[in-house]
Amino acid sequence: MSPLVAALSRHDEGHLGHRAGWLRAAVLGANDGLVSTSSLMVGVATASSVQHGAVLTAGLAGLAAGAMAMAAGEWVSVSSQGDVERADLEREQQELVDNPDAELEELAQIYQARGLPRRLAEQVAVELSRKDALAAHARDELGLSEIHHARPGQAALASAASFLAGGLVPFLGMLGSATGAARILAIVAVTLLGLAVAGVLGARAAGTSLTRPALRVVLGGAAAMAVTAAVGQLAGVAGV
């Protein structure tokens, strides 16, 4: 084995771009589950004369509806992204059939713009086109790759599952015999803790620093619960 091959075999950069599709849906689902379920429960609990059962029912209804909405939304949006990608590839394939010389020149200009000398850019374009012209244009002209390929089923499942996981956390604040303001504070406390954990886990999965993502989701969740608590209070005072 040559020294170069040996060095490359030991060189593992551990890039995490392949996680982008499901990670985005999972992080979004967990945060949304935590924030929307807890906010709904806090808003209902803040209204006057609301019993324990009403808060629990509101939370369960929000959990079920939110999980289905997240799954459906991810499926539709990612499927639409896939439709666009397929349409672009079909259009590019037709252009390769209709005008291969122009497409080859287009590819050479792309490589030249990235810093290759003109002659080398032409050689690279020819060699890559000889191997798989559509793949070369998809990657270098359209910016499409297998890593970022749209996967509706994966995104929908990750989003729904993470929403359910995150949405169950606020129910921990319903345990015990706390009532009134103490119950609301318990829901808020476990939700903020869950948001901090979700932020840290998401940052670790993405390979980024831990502090900023955790702080971001905690502050966003706190603001959402504060707004819904105020709405619930106003609704209770108005007798809605």
Image (cartoon, rainbow, N blue to C red):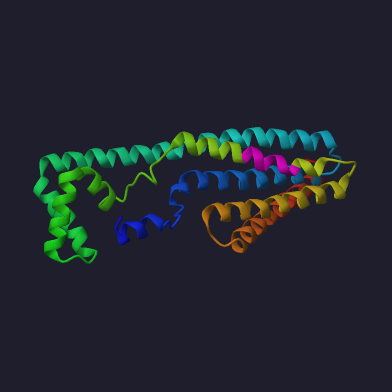
User: Is the N terminus in the top left, top right, bottom left or bottom right quadrant?
Assistant: bottom left
Residue farthest right in this picture: 177
Residues rendered magenta in the picture: 163-170
Residue 168 is inside the magenta segment: yes
Q: Residue at x 67, y 36 (%)?
A: 63
Observer-nearest of 87 and 21: 21
Q: Residue at x 60, y 35 (%)?
A: 67
Name the side, left or right, on which 100 lies relative to 88: left
- Residue 138 drawn at (x, y percent): 27, 46
Observer-nearest of 113 and 224: 113
Name the image quarter holding residue 113.
bottom left
Name the image quarter holding residue 77.
top left
Residue farthest front in this picture: 1
Name the image quarter holding residue 70.
top right
Name the side, left or right, on which 129 lies relative to 16: left
- Residue 93 drawn at (x, y percent): 20, 40
Observer-nearest of 155 and 60: 155
Total count of labels: 0
Q: Residue at x 51, y 36 (%)?
A: 156
Q: Is residue 140 above or below residue 174?
A: below
User: Is the C terminus in the top left, top right, bottom left or bottom right quadrant?
Assistant: top right
- Residue 146 drawn at (x, y percent): 36, 44
Question: Main SS of the magenta segment?
Answer: helix
Name the side, left or right, on which 39 lies relative to 210: right
- Residue 167 drawn at (x, y percent): 68, 41
Q: Residue at x 57, y 62 (%)?
A: 209
Residue 92 is inside the magenta segment: no
